Image (cartoon, rainbow, N blue to C red):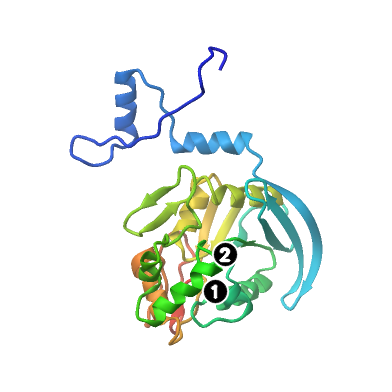
């Protein structure tokens, strides 16, 4: 700007000689040969983590619940004004190996007990495990209804599922993303899962800001969703292990859970009770028909 030029940059994909996307070592060679500046996604993350204030603590208060006493923290996003809540049980202390659950808002499942998903069961089971663990943070993220498409789109998708479409096909028929919770500027995708795999700019920056503000430094993440596990690690928080969140499969949720496993990369227990391992030391199997958390 001192030179009177606009501060601009170019984002593009460079194809390697074999037709595949060029990776960072090849890109560094290209940039050096062409006298170009280059930064990585990791560089962007570090810069924004240092410079950006992404949310603010709006209020906090103790709340007695059926799972015992918690302290609730309301964080307001400075990007879109959405308010998220962190339910904290016990003393965070030095912030080492805190059990963390990230739960996306689901009005139909969490409040009304809809049998079309297992969200309500996931939340109840998470709260029960939190009660037993004693030192936990549960982040309840609002604005994620229907994997981010909203209630007005979620209900028409339900109608298509009644007609035989699965959860992914229903969204695609309506021209909706399969999962928009992790889309954002600079979000990377993994086509195998057909959903954003590391939503580095939009959602994980809020998660990491809230967790860091609460004093969490390393965590054991309660999830079977690879996107959450890898996304949090990719944004600089240390994840010491994964704790499966296993809920019973019902007649109503069986196809939905199979779709999440086959088309969205989620990992859940099979009818034999075996859990397909992901990462960390906590991948223990349990008996019965079990499913994963979102």
Q: Is residue 205 left or right of residue 78?
A: left
Of marks 1 and 2, which one's residue comes earlier in the chain? 2
Residue that extends furthest to the left in the rendered view of this protein: 18
Residue found 47% across the figure and 38% down from its top:
42
Residue found 46% across the figure and 59% down from its top:
280
Residue that extends furthest to the right in the rendered view of this protein: 61
Instruction: Name which quarter of the figure residue 278 lies in.
Output: bottom left
- Is disc 1 surrounded by few (<14), some (14 to 19) or many (20+) residues within 10 Å? many
Q: Are marks 1 and 2 in contact (CB under 8 Å)?
A: yes
What is the quadrant of the N terminus in the image? top right
For mark 2, give the secondary structure.
strand
Residue 184 seen in render:
yes
Is 236 situated above or below 169?
above
Residue found 70% across the figure and 54% down from its top:
75
Q: Nearer the viewer, residue 3 or 76?
A: 3
- Is disc 2 surrounded by few (<14), some (14 to 19) or many (20+) residues within 10 Å? many
Instruction: Residue 175 in the image: state x and y as whole percent.
Output: 39, 62
Residue that extends furthest to the bottom in the rendered view of this protein: 251
Instruction: Residue 5 in the image: state x and y as whole percent.
Output: 51, 17
Q: Nearer the viewer, residue 18 or 115?
A: 115
Residue at mark 1? 119
Cα distance in 3D space between marks 1 and 2: 8 Å
For mark 1, give the secondary structure.
helix
Instruction: Residue 136 in the image: state x and y as whole percent.
Output: 66, 63
Is 20 situated above or below 292?
above
Identify the mark at residue 104; answer none if there is no mark.
2
Instruction: Residue 88 in the image: state x and y as whole percent.
Output: 71, 62
């Amino acid at each position: 700007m001192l030179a009177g030029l606009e501060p601009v940059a170019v984002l593009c994909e460079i194809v390697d000689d074999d037709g595949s996307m060029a990776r960072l070592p090849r890109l560094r060679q290209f940039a050096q040969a062409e006298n170009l500046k280059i930064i990585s996604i990791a560089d962007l993350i570090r810069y924004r983590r240092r410079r950006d204030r992404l949310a603010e603590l709006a209020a906090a208060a103790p709340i007695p619940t059926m799972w015992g006493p918690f302290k609730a923290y309301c964080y307001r996003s400075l990007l879109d004004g959405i308010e998220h809540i962190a339910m904290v049980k016990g003393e965070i202390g030095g912030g080492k190996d805190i059990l963390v659950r990230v739960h996306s808002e689901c009005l139909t499942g969490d409040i009304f007990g809809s049998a079309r998903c297992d969200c309500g069961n996931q939340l109840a089971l998470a709260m029960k495990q939190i009660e037993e663990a004693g030192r936990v943070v549960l982040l309840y993220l609002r604005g994620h209804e229907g994997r981010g498409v909203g209630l007005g789109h979620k209900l028409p998708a339900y109608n298509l599922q009644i007609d035989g479409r699965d959860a992914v096909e229903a969204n695609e028929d309506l021209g909706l993303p399969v999962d928009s919770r992790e889309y954002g500027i600079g979000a990377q995708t993994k086509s195998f899962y057909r959903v954003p795999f590391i939503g580095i700019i939009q959602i994980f920056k809020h998660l990491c800001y809230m967790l860091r503000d609460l004093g969490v430094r390393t965590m054991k993440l309660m999830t079977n969703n690879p996107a959450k596990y890898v996304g949090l690690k990719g944004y600089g928080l240390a994840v010491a292990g994964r704790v499966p969140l296993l809920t019973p499969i019902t007649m109503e949720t069986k196809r939905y859970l199979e779709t999440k496993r086959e088309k969205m990369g989620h990992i859940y227990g099979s009818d034999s009770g075996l859990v397909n391992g992901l990462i960390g030391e906590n991948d223990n199997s349990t008996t019965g028909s079990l499913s994963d958390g979102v």
